[in-house]
Image (cartoon, rainbow, N blue to C red):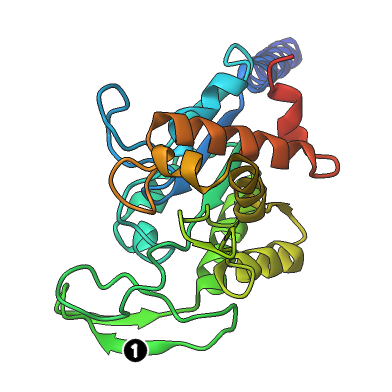
Amino acid sequence: MKKNKKNRSLILVAIFFILTSFTLIKLQEHKPTLFIIGDSTVRNGTTQIGNPLQGWGSFIGESFDTTRIAVRNNALGGTSSRTFISMGLWNKVIAKLQPGDFVIMQFGHNDSSPLNDNSRARGTIKGTGDETQVIDNLLTKKKDTVYSYGWYLRKYVTDAQSKGATAIICSPVPRNNWANGKVIRNDNDYGKWAKETAEKMKIGFVDLNNLIADRYDKLGADSVKHLFPSDNTHTGPTGAIINAQCVVEGLKAIKGCQLVKFLKK
């Protein structure tokens, strides 16, 4: 009887070690994923080939060693930091996040839209505060609580970190708007609020607005206008590639950024 109990104990111990070994192997085999979220300046359409308008998220994967890290561009045109959540897009990303993954976010271009209308209802409260506004959403016909731009960014960061992922915030890319021979920056609104949020959350920040604007200033207005095929917001492929290069430049400037080690050498 004692011998049978001893044998059962040995079997249970063996099973425990086998299961533990499989778990460790699975964890070691997990290839990190870089998830990118944002609006049309990050991903304008669902296809890259043939689309005259492109976001930088469609090209940044070319800078990474995809044998070591996967790159998933989950951005969607027309979204704001608010509607990317309300449309259920963020929950789909959260469901896939694993420890060791990365999330780069860039919102702001659509956050200045109306808080409530019957077309998109995608605006957010300006700033980074905790104030809220309850509305009868004309689009969804439901009660809706709207938060600040900074509040939504903080939610993305907190949710990503809760899954063991690293979050990085980018300021919005600049538009093709000029004054006195220089590209107009958003240092007093969404660029400022993106930076403040990153600093408050103590995470990496890519000052994409200024990085790209500096590049555009060097190219000059006449050259930059050819990067925007149809309007002053959306770039074509060449402009998107330039913007992606600026994202990489910004990542390299982040002290201790672990994502950099996955860049191609």
- x, y (%) of residue 243? 55, 39
Which residue is rendered at x = 69% and y = 20% of the image?
Answer: 24
Element at label 1: strand
Compared across the picture, whether 10 is left or right of 216 comes to right
Quadrant of the image occupied by residue 259: top right
Which residue is rendered at x = 46% and y = 79% of the image?
Answer: 147
Q: Is residue 74 visible?
A: no
Picture mark count: 1
Q: Quadrant of the N terminus?
A: top right
In the image, 94 versus 173, the foreground residue is 173
Dot 1 amino acid type: Val
Give the residue number, with chain letter if any, for mark 1. 134
Q: Is residue 199 visible?
A: yes
- x, y (%) of residue 144? 30, 80
- x, y (%) of residue 12? 67, 19
Q: Quadrant of the C terminus?
A: top right
Compared across the picture, whether 154 is left or right of 239 comes to right
In the image, 52 versus 260, the foreground residue is 52
Above or below, 31 relative to 3:
below
Which residue is rendered at x = 74% and y = 69% of the image?
Answer: 200
